[in-house]
Image: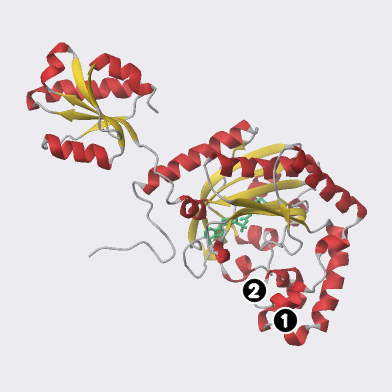
Amino acid sequence: MTFRPPKGTDDILPPASSRWDDVLVSFDRLATAYGYEPVFTPIFESTEVFERGVGENTDIVGKEMYTFTDRGGRSLTLRPEATAGVMRAHLATGGAGVAKFYYSGPMFRYEKPQAGRRRQFWQVGIEYLGQDSPLADVEVIEAGARFFTEIGLPALEVRLNSLGDAASRARYRDVLVEYLRDHQQSLSDESQRRIDTNPLRVLDSKLDRDVVAGAPAPVEHLTAAAADHYAAVKEYLIRVGVEFREDPRLVRGLDYYTRTVFEYIAGRLDAAQDAVGGGGRYDGLAETLGGKSVPAVGFSLGIDRIMTALSGESPPGCLDVFVILADETLQGDAFEYLSRLRRAGVSADMDLGGRSVKAQFKAADRRRARVAAVVGAEWAEGQVTVRDMVKGEESLMGADQLIGAAGGLA
Ligand code: HAM
């Protein structure tokens, strides 16, 4: 009997797993270059962290959480996202000053599984805590856009909007509710229910496009301070060369946002799952979690969707050198040589099963080695035959010389 992974989850196996790893490593490098430090928070939290943080009237909290009672009678939830947990951790240390965090890990949402909508999915993200300046919003949005450029994701669009500060949001909510009540008859059942619980989410409804098209937009009801903040974000995005498109209907599926919100859209994906990342400012989250006021902005990117959008791009090489044994009396020498390559920082492997040279070349190909180094007749002269696995060209090379050269192959 064999088991399949649970519904909505995936095994990530070679060769895809190497690609994932490359993308995750690129993200760590980029976040570090922007001055962010890693943070690791628990994969489960008290359910209340998400009920309060993400919002009780959101789809995530209402119907998508993996919530369970532990043996001690506590209600716990597998994290559906990381921002609330990161803020909780920051507040637990006092919540003072500026903190710049990045993270990477699995998140869990009980969704109807389909391509790009998984029950366990991987997010990377950054959170810039304790900074009110619009330049922090710009830094965060720019970092995400730069990441997509670095990994070669084609046709990316940045969509931008402002929901306003707490005062603008209260003002806007009244105007929106009035408009929705006037059009109640034309709304879907779900949107009618949301008029009282979460009217902003109606703007996101795919079933109510006509009513939504005529609805007032949050940007039309910003306070002067919120409008200034939004104007500064746009001005500096232009100055740092990030192209964006304003989308006055962009609202997000989490309740904690104030002022700036944004999404990264990949042109290559189906419209329903084309957001490869999203984020925004969440100045009220810290207080919602019972802490002091901590202005903050951040994003999370969905690695599963990013990998789908990247598929078709050529897979990266995996190994620098695959050692091929052409004379079985040299197995000990070849193994020692393999060890020397590895100690020199060259990624290398060989087949230990005593298979034919042809089978070993096949294995080198499958492992996407850049070169194969054959240990055989010329070994006695300190030489190996090196085959470029892409071009198919062969040459003789000193075994030591290859160790030096292979480091530069990557
Ligand atoms: P989110 O929009 O819910 O925001 O998720 C961010 C990204 O995670 C999405 O754009 C998508 O690429 C990916 N994603 C979400 N759900 C799934 C799923 N079921 N399957 C596959 N991918 C998925 C957040 O999570 C916020 N924490 C973002 C943030 C950080 N805001 C401020 N800081």
Frontmost of labels 1 and 2 is 2
Q: Nearer the viewer, residue 394 or 78?
A: 394
Quarter containing the C terminus: top left
Q: Position of residue 238 (x, y in %)?
A: 76, 42
The CA span between labels 1 and 2 is 14 Å
Q: Earlier in the sequence, mark 1 or mark 2?
A: 1
Q: Position of residue 38 (x, y in %)?
A: 58, 37
Q: Where is 249 relative to 130, above or below? A: below
Tell me the kind of residue under disc 1: Gln
Left or right of 396: which side holds 315?
right
Left or right of 252: which side holds 405?
left
In contact (CB < 8 Å): disc 1 and disc 2: no
Say which residue appears at 55% left-offset and 39% top-offset: 150
Say which residue appears at 29% left-offset and 33% top-offset: 391
Quarter containing the N terminus: bottom left
Q: Quadrant of ligand 1?
A: bottom right
Res 405 quadrant in image: top left
Say which residue appears at 65% left-offset and 57% top-offset: 49
Q: Where is 355 relative to 396, above or below? A: below
Left or right of 86: which side holds 223?
right
Res 329 quadrant in image: top left
Tell me the kind of residue under disc 2: Lys
- The residue lying furthest to the left in this view is 329
Q: Secondary structure at mark 1?
A: helix
Q: Where is 154 relative to 188, above or below? A: above
Q: Position of residue 325 (x, y in %)?
A: 15, 28
State the residue position of label 2: 206
